Image (spheres, grey):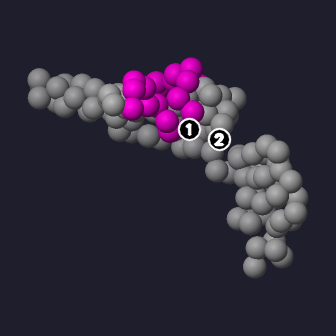
Amino acid sequence: MVAGRVDVERALRAATFREFDEAFTAPLHGFRDANDYYARSSSGPWIVGVAVPTLAIHALDDPFLPSAALPLAALRANRRFTPRISERGGHVGFVAGTPWAPRFYAEEMLARFFASHFDRRESK
């Protein structure tokens, strides 16, 4: 099934995510090319309609979603979003500290975010 839809050899030679998406991901899932895949799979157009408080955590060094792909304008335009963009963190990494005392940034941010919203509801 895969061999008929994608260029497996080209995918194996890919040196970047874009090259891999062009050769494999896009055709496998019915997209015209990598640009079509990125445009139609982006969360950007949906952000305007989000009506509940939402925390968006991202690292600028994420190898899968480079900073140029972030819909920052849309995130900033919707007051329901709280964007937390860090310089480092990789792809869902956000672990700091030592192996014996790790700190999990995303989980800590989420706990603070929830606490701030629960505190506001209780004070009304």
Three-letter code for the amino acid on which mark 1 is drawn = His
Q: Residue at x 17, y 26 (%)?
A: 119
Q: Categorize mark 2 by other alpha carbons within 10 Å: few (<14), some (14-19), many (20+).
A: few
Quadrant position of the C terminus in the picture: top left
- Secondary structure at numbered mark 1: loop
Question: Mark 2 highlights which residue?
Answer: 64
Task: State yes or no: residue 82 in magenta.
Answer: yes
Q: Which mark is residue 91?
A: 1
Q: Residue at x 83, y 76 (%)?
A: 4
Three-letter code for the amino acid on which mark 2 is drawn = Phe
- Where residue 25 appears, as percent x and y from the top left, is 73, 58
- Secondary structure at numbered mark 2: loop
Lower position in the chain sequence, tag 1 or tag 2:
2
Residue 104, picture quadrant: top left
Q: Residue at x 57, y 43 (%)?
A: 43
Q: Nearer the viewer, residue 15 or 20?
A: 15
Residue that lies at the very extreme toward the bottom in this rendered image: 1
- Where residue 29 appears, as percent x and y from the top left, is 70, 65
**Residue 113 seen in the current view:** no
Side of 41 relative to 79 (left or right): right
Residue 113, picture quadrant: top left
